[in-house]
Amino acid sequence: MSWDRFQKYFLDLPELGFALDVSRTGLDDAFLAKMAGKAKRAFSAMKKLEKGAVANPDEGRMVGHYWLRNPKVVPRGHKTIADGIRKAQKDIASFAKDVHSGKVAGQGGKFTDVLVIGIGGSALGPQFVSRALGSVKTDKMAVHFFDNTDPAGMAAVLDELDGRLGNTLSVVISKSGGTPETRNGMLVAKAAYEKAGLSFAKHAVAVTGVDSKMDKQAVAEGWLTRFPMWDWVGGRTSETGPVGLVPAALQGLDTAALLGGAAKMDEATRLADPLKNPAMLLALAWYCETGGKGKKDMVVLPYKDGLELFSKYLQQLIMESLGKEKDLAGKVVNQGISVYGNKGSTDQHAYVQQLREGVPNFFATFIEVLEEGGAGVEVEPGVTSGDYLQGFLLGTRAALAEKGRNSLTITVRKVDAFTVGTLIALYERAVGFYATLVGINAYHQPGVEAGKKAAAGILAAKLKIQALLATEKAGLTAEEISGKIALNDPELASKLLESLAANPAKKVLKVPGTTLAETKYLSA
Ligand code: PA5
């Protein structure tokens, strides 16, 4: 790697405590020249988006996450939006203050814990930020999450809160207000509060779309308060809205600095010059590495424990935004970039072996944090474990380059609220640019909706099987049951029966046959 090439493709933004090095990707002047037209169109589309154009055509929605950290850029004619953002931020700060002071309290007294209930874009951002910025020493409240419909997972979280539910504030987050996993989490939490002789409503807060099912429930049941989710903010780009700010403010994190970092990065990523705009440079590097067709996976390796969940957060932001069957013209393109990663140097002892020597189907993103943190203990004369961390990052990067495996490197000064804000804004913008470069809608998620519909059909079939077997004494095979309820899918019937039989509360008895086809099921 030449020093000249490094300098040419190294973008340093000291005022942001941020730098991006794409010199170890395939990007060069010829590629930039080839992409100039596409980049110009992406800049122009982004400008229109920020000015309020309907940038999510399928859902007929504006896309306004950039307004969340600077209401001054809300387009003319939408004063109510700017006012709504400011009011929500003020309300969140004042609610958190009242919770911290004990003015708003639970039935057990001052709130000490927060239980966030949400999934996807309504959980991953809050989880990432909570982990990146939280500290047992300074946090005002301990934050816990229900982010799935797994009863065992939720029971484990409730065990952590055992005896403290009267001091636990539940924050239920769902833009649509109808996501099954979140509804289930809320009902499981409600049952736990009731079992402890407590009222759920007196410990519950909603973050949801105005007039959504959950919003109406919160009003009807008299929950403590509600914060809005607006239709012009997508789930995976909602971290700088009430979705992210409510949990962060309750935890006691510096939400003003988070918003400030995002706003500063927004300014930097509005520059219509690919070599000076970190988000466009990132999007172009992705395009260069993947051929604009997802040919290579993106491996995200932050060398800092606090950023561990960034890879998971990015996985959703990038894959749910870019993983699309059709382009904007309706042509089948099957777009996307696969994203995975965890943290360095831990991953060097997991899959980095394959990255260096195995199938060359990826490009890496190294995230370097300059400030070591910790106690500065010397593990060898003059050497801290932070020196080792940097050594491993640079060593691995060089080892990959030696074998012709490309990478890009993001360097930040430290992991604080400002920096986390810059990283969120950087990737939100890069995803938006990349989507325009490849001609897709980044802001809808038809695949997620399809999964929700399929699950509803399966649950209905399971209920039919339970009803059928409630009076069944002789026993029926999966094939017979499938026929009787007109499912016409013995394999699915068999899967559902095995689950029913494994859970005594479902009252289904399994009589094993010599083969699965001969196995019978009846009322227990
Ligand atoms: O990013 C998205 O849009 C999704 O991941 C949603 O956040 C997720 O499906 C949860 O939706 P909701 O907030 O409506 O419960």
Image (cartoon, grey):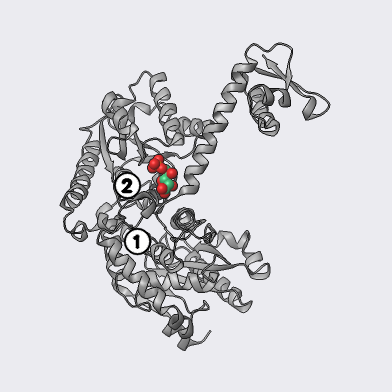
Residue 264 drawn at (x, y percent) = 27, 65
Q: Which mark is residue 330?
A: none
- The residue at which mark 1 appears reads as 425
Q: Amino acid at mark 1?
A: Ala
Element on which disc 2 rests: helix
> For mark 2, does the 10 Å Cα neighbourhood hold few (<14), some (14 to 19), or many (20 or more) residues?
many
Residue 507 drawn at (x, y percent) = 63, 16
Residue 233 drawn at (x, y percent) = 32, 50
Q: Quadrant of residue 491?
A: top right
Residue 404 drawn at (x, y percent) = 61, 77
Residue visible at 62% across and 19% down in the picture: 504
Nearer mark to the viewer, of 2 and 1: 1
Residue furthest right in the image = 514
Between 486 and 506, the one nearer to me in the picture: 486
Residue visible at 26% across and 54% down in the picture: 68
Q: Is there any visible trace of residue 125 in the rendered image?
A: yes
Q: Amino acid at mark 2?
A: Ala
Between 79 and 368, the one nearer to me in the picture: 79
- The residue at which mark 2 appears reads as 248
Q: State which tag comes first along the sequence, 2 or 1.
A: 2
